Amino acid sequence: MPSPLAPPSDAPPPGTVERWAWDYVLSVDLEHKLSPPPVPSLWESDATLSASGAAPVPPRRLERPGRPAALRISERAQKSPGPEALRNPARRAQLFHAFLHHELQAAELMAWALLAFPGTPRAFRGGLVRIALDEARHMRLYAAYLAAIGHRFGDFPVRDWFWTRVPAAASPAQFVAVMGMGLEGGNLDHTARFAERFRAIGDVEGAALTERVGAEEIPHVRFGVRWFRRFTQASGSAGQAAPSTSAAGHPAAAGEAAPRGPEDVAPRGSSDFDVWVRHIPPPLSPLLMRGEPMNRRDRSRSGLSEPFLDALASWTERAPGS
């Protein structure tokens, strides 16, 4: 019998945003993953303000997500179909199935970060909620496409690759470096490439859906860029100043600040790209976060500077110690 995903005693109080995130990550109900319940308006810190001598909200780093029984977990990656192979509806279904699972992991990991970094500004955590809801909506769009071609979520094995890498982020700066600027930035490249391939084989619906998701990922990357700049206090133009309120409308609570360590401070004179690379936990690297061809237009619209994009485009793996 598998061990519990997390001790129930560690759960946040019911009726809070944190409990919503906890329940979303750990749920084994596929419908819950696709259509999460409404987000409460109460934060755990608000719920404990009236309690005498209440302790600060603790970090909660969930090790793995709940998985519906319908999903078959694989340790091996499925080979991505080439342009001609996409003419086969079954291969297209397999690819959109993978897209859907990527969105699921992204939604879960936004909720994971909300729990892992409770000392960050409320505007940041509210933004994570907004993005998680966007990713769940993308899941439903992909599920509808699959249904239209005779498939459903669970027809193909899935790989929890994001979950094996992203929780290595030890700070909020590392999290947005990997998830927002890295993996979601790479998705701007992938969605543009696959939309072109779908249109080339006459799949107008698949192309339009992929382009729609790609366009809606731009604000997610912009969110990562802005908060990376805020957390690292980097000089240069990797992103713009962090917003004072989240897109969900939650104001930053007075006195809330992100925990910072020496690795989170940008040395004077460092380029934005160099600071970003230092915040990517190994064995991840910029190569895994860059598609071919690179979608410079949408990456630029997300707030990444031209020097940053030039450095990313020319990156090659460096030998240890170099």
Image (tube, rainbow, N blue to C red):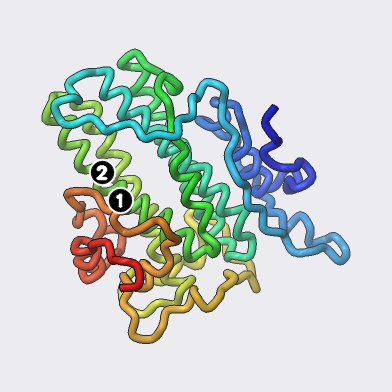
Disc 2 element? helix
Instruction: Compare residues 14 and 272 and report the one nearer the observer.
Output: 272
For the point 37% across and 73% down, the residue is 275
Q: Quadrant of the N terminus?
A: top right
Tag 2: residue type? Answer: His
Residue lying furthest left in this view? 200
Q: Categorize mark 2 by other alpha carbons within 10 Å: few (<14), some (14-19), many (20+).
A: some
Q: Categorize mark 1 by other alpha carbons within 10 Å: few (<14), some (14-19), many (20+).
A: many
For the point 58% across and 42% down, the residue is 64
Reply above or below: 150 against 259.
Answer: above
The residue that label 1 is drawn on is: 186
Q: Is disc 1 in contact with disc 2, using a CB cutoff of under 8 Å? A: yes
In the rendered image, residue 45, in percent from the top left (x then y), is placed at 72, 59
Spatial CA span between label 1 and label 2: 6 Å
Is there any visible trace of residue 248 in the rendered image? no
Residue 10 in the figure: left or right of residue 156: right
Is there any visible trace of residue 40 in the rendered image? yes
Reply above or below: 230 against 141.
Answer: below
The residue that label 2 is drawn on is: 190
Tag 1: residue type? Answer: Gly
Residue 39 occupies quadrant: top right
In the drawing, what numbered circle is on residue 21? none
